[in-house]
Image (tube, rainbow, N blue to C red):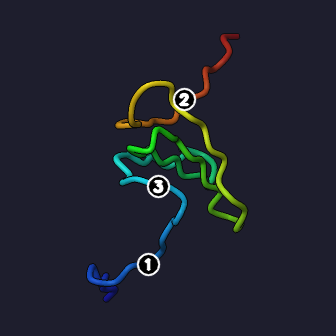
Amino acid sequence: MDSVRIDKCVIQFPAHMEPIYTCDWHPTQNWLATGSRDKQIKIWNMEGKASPRAYNTLYSSSRACKWRQKKRKKA
């Protein structure tokens, strides 16, 4: 039987300067998007150790992020 310890940090992402409010996994890629009070959304490639891509929001903290589904072309 597998057990999960909730009292131990598994991985840490030290890139946001303020608390993270939201995160979302990409539906087909191994990417994680995080949004923070520091007015940034960061895209993490979970397969490598490269720095995340950062995108600044204009006015306020990032309280929600969601990957947009790719539109399918009609035949």
Q: Residue at x 61, y 20 (%)?
A: 71
Q: How would you rate the neighbour count of disc 3 (Cα within 10 Å): few for under 14, some for 14-19, many for 20 or more?
A: few
Task: Give yes or no for contact between labels 1 and 2 (Cβ–Cβ under 8 Å).
Answer: no
Q: How would you rate the neighbour count of disc 2 (Cα within 10 Å): few for under 14, some for 14-19, many for 20 or more?
A: few
Which residue lies most toward the bottom here? 1
Label placed on residue 17: 3
Task: Give yes or no for contact between labels 3 and 2 (Cβ–Cβ under 8 Å).
Answer: no
Label placed on residue 24: none
Query: Mark 1: which amino acid?
Result: Val
Mark closer to the chain start, 1 or 2: 1
Task: Give yes or no for contact between labels 3 and 1 (Cβ–Cβ under 8 Å).
Answer: no
Q: Position of residue 70 (x, y in %)?
A: 61, 27
Who is closer to the viewer here, 69 or 59? 59
Q: Residue at x 48, y 48 (%)?
A: 34
Indicate the quadrant containing the N terminus: top left, top right, bottom left or bottom right: bottom left
Q: Quadrant of residue 27?
A: top right
Mark closer to the chain start, 3 or 1: 1
Spatial separation of the CA atoms under disc 3 and disc 2: 29 Å
Which residue lies most toward the top here? 75
Query: Mark 3: which amino acid?
Result: Met
Q: Residue at x 72, y 62 (%)?
A: 50
Query: Mark 2: which amino acid?
Result: Gln
Which marked residue is nearer to the observer: mark 1 or mark 2?
1
Indicate the quadrant containing the C terminus: top left, top right, bottom left or bottom right: top right
